[in-house]
Amino acid sequence: MSDSIEKLPKLVEDIVQTSVDTGPRGVLRLAQGVQAFLGVGQEWLTDVSK
């Protein structure tokens, strides 16, 4: 479980870095990344709370 917790900040960092690198389209990609992150985060929380 702790491995998952440690990976979350790295995932966010990668998403933000990719967004910055891609320029104007990066904003759209960041929004998609946040949506994906929230989806994964909800699944992760569901698994952890079992």
Image (cartoon, rainbow, N blue to C red):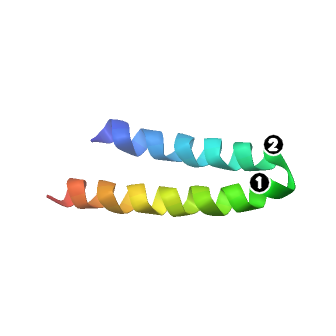
Q: Nearer the viewer, residue 28 or 16?
A: 28
Cβ atoms under marks 2 and 1 closer than 8 Å: yes
Quarter holding the C terminus is: bottom left
> Residue 41: x, y in percent?
40, 58
Which residue corresponds to mark 1? 26
Q: Residue at x 57, y 60 (%)?
A: 34
Using residue 9 as the reference point, say whether residue 26 is left or right of it: right
Q: Foreground residue, 25 or 15?
A: 25
Q: Is residue 9 above or below residue 29?
A: above
Residue 29 vs residue 48: left or right? Answer: right
Q: Alpha-carbon neighbours of circle 1 within 10 Å: few (<14), some, or many (≥20)?
A: some
**Kind of residue at disc 1:** Gly
Of the numbered discs in the image, which one, if any, rests on residue 41?
A: none
| Image quadrant occupied by the N terminus | top left
Report which residue position mark 2 lands on. Answer: 21
Identify the residue at horizontal 53%, vertical 63% (top origin).
35
Amino acid residing under circle 2: Asp
Q: Residues within 10 Å of mark 2 (few under 14, many from 20)?
A: few
Secondary structure beneath label 1 = helix
Total labels: the figure holds 2
For this orientation, the residue located farthest to the left is 50
Left or right of 3 on screen, residue 28: right
Q: What residue do we see at 36% from left, 41% from top?
A: 4
Residue for point 55% across, 40% down: 10
